[in-house]
Amino acid sequence: MALARAFASVASLTRQGESKLGFAGKAFASTTTVNGVPVEVHNEGGSKRVVVTKTLPGERWLQFLINAGCRVEVSKHPDVILSNATIKQLMGTKCDGVIGQLTEDWGSELFEALKQAGGKAYSNYAVGYNNVKVDEATKRGIPVGNTPGVLTETTAELAAALTLAAARRVPEADVFMRSGKYKGWLPSLFVGQLLQNKTVGIIGAGRIGAAYARMMVEGHKMNLVYFDPYPNKQLEDYIRLYGELLRHRGEPPVAVKRVETVEEVLKEADVVSLHCNLDASTRHLINSQRLALMKPTAVLVNAARGPCIDEAALVAHLKANPEFRCGLDVFEDEPAMKPGLADCPNAVIVPHIASASLWTRSGMATLAAANVAGILSGYPVWNKQDILGFVDKPLAAAPHAAPSIVNAKELKLKMVAE
Ligand SMILES: NC(=O)c1ccc[n+]([C@@H]2O[C@H](COP(=O)([O-])OP(=O)(O)OC[C@H]3O[C@@H](n4cnc5c(N)ncnc54)[C@H](O)[C@@H]3O)[C@@H](O)[C@H]2O)c1
């Protein structure tokens, strides 16, 4: 609490903690209400109506939609998390597409309302889409977009920040300092864990897991042990080559190992970071039995999804093992925390900000808008990994495609040729 109060007084933040940078209202927008909900309207004369449930950063995303002939209505509803009823009010009786948030419940109720309003496209403003029942959209012929590729490094960096903050007890020491308790240097003051040459474990070696692994291996010469149903050959090759380089220079080499079970990672690693997607196989992947396998001085990081950890079991484990630390960006019952978590000094907790760099958040907006604009324009679906052409190229040179549609195959949408 003390830390939160201190930051609120020094940083330029709005009441909700939102940075105003890049979120400035667009000069050419007008405001109105739709079924009682205030909205900011862009390109009033556009023939297709697109609803955006939250203000998005940057300007480029808007250009994608305006160039596709869309009238864009951005909700200004004061609630942080919009209810289904509010989203249905916003969609009304004519709505061609929606850009929604991971905090919303996109299931049969909302997709039926979108379908009834003539909707042809939905994009989540996120790479993860566990809040979307994709089969309910597919049933109604609605393509669902997500925003992969622009969150990778930003999210990995926050996971690395949580790792270091937890291992070296940075928030605890910060609160101590601000509360005037520092009376001078002491050998025993906030002693934490050194990461150099230890072992980092990751569960889920996809885009973000691999980027995080490289940061920890290259930055701290850590060995890597990982579990993923699929091997990440590229990551393994990279770390082997890096190990060779170190050996060549006379330094201790680093090693990489893929193991067959989550348990093996937990037993061996000094730091374990979760980077899997949330589904039935990863819900409560970390539970009390598995926590008991971890080293008593280990650091557990979660910048994936809250329900991957049984949070009540984690609180009990943190209380019983004061040298065990965790860094959490996500929470099981977000925005709530399980009772007792906020009182654990060995937990570093931040409010789901892993993707919160301006480049990433603007890029996510661009990809979400390009998904909706691409589908409404009848463009094919981009089936290549590299999506930066949508984000960083001059607008006129951006591909004529919808960057990432997760149910493209099921809907038999046309793909861009390789
Ligand atoms: N905190 C945030 O703000 C934030 C930001 C971006 C992404 N995320 C989360 O991170 C997840 C990963 O993103 P990504 O872009 O790296 O996705 P990705 O699809 O590239 O990687 C996910 C990896 O998890 C693996 N996996 C699936 N089931 C598993 C299991 N049971 N055990 C271990 N591994 C398993 C997959 O094989 C894949 O390699 C997203 O699904 C999202 O939920 C969170």
Image (cartoon, grey):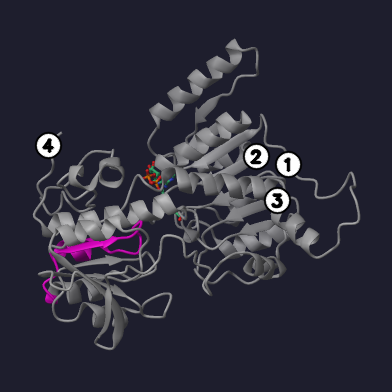
> What is the distance, in whole Å, between disc 2 and disc 3 at their CAs?
10 Å
> In the rendered structure, which disc, 1 or 2, sits on the residue that comes first in sequence?
1
Identify the residue under disc 4. 417
Quarter of the image for residue 397 reads top left
Instruction: Tell me residue 32's x, y (percent).
Output: 26, 83
Circle 4: element type: loop
Residue shown at 46%/24% (left/top)?
A: 238
Magenta segment includes 126: yes
Secondary structure category for the residue under label 3 = loop
Which numbered disc, 1 or 2, marks the residue closer to the eye? Answer: 1
The amino acid on which the numbered mark 2 sits, given as a three-letter code, is Asp
Cα–Cα span, label 3 and label 4: 50 Å
Q: Earlier in the sequence, mark 1 or mark 3?
A: 1
Cβ atoms at labels 4 and 1 below 8 Å apart: no
Q: Which residue is mark 3?
A: 324
| Quadrant placement of the N terminus | bottom right
Q: Which residues are magenta?
A: 116-140
Give me the disc on residue 270. Answer: 2
Residue on which disc 1 sits:
193
Look at the image and tell me whether residue 170 can be seen.
yes
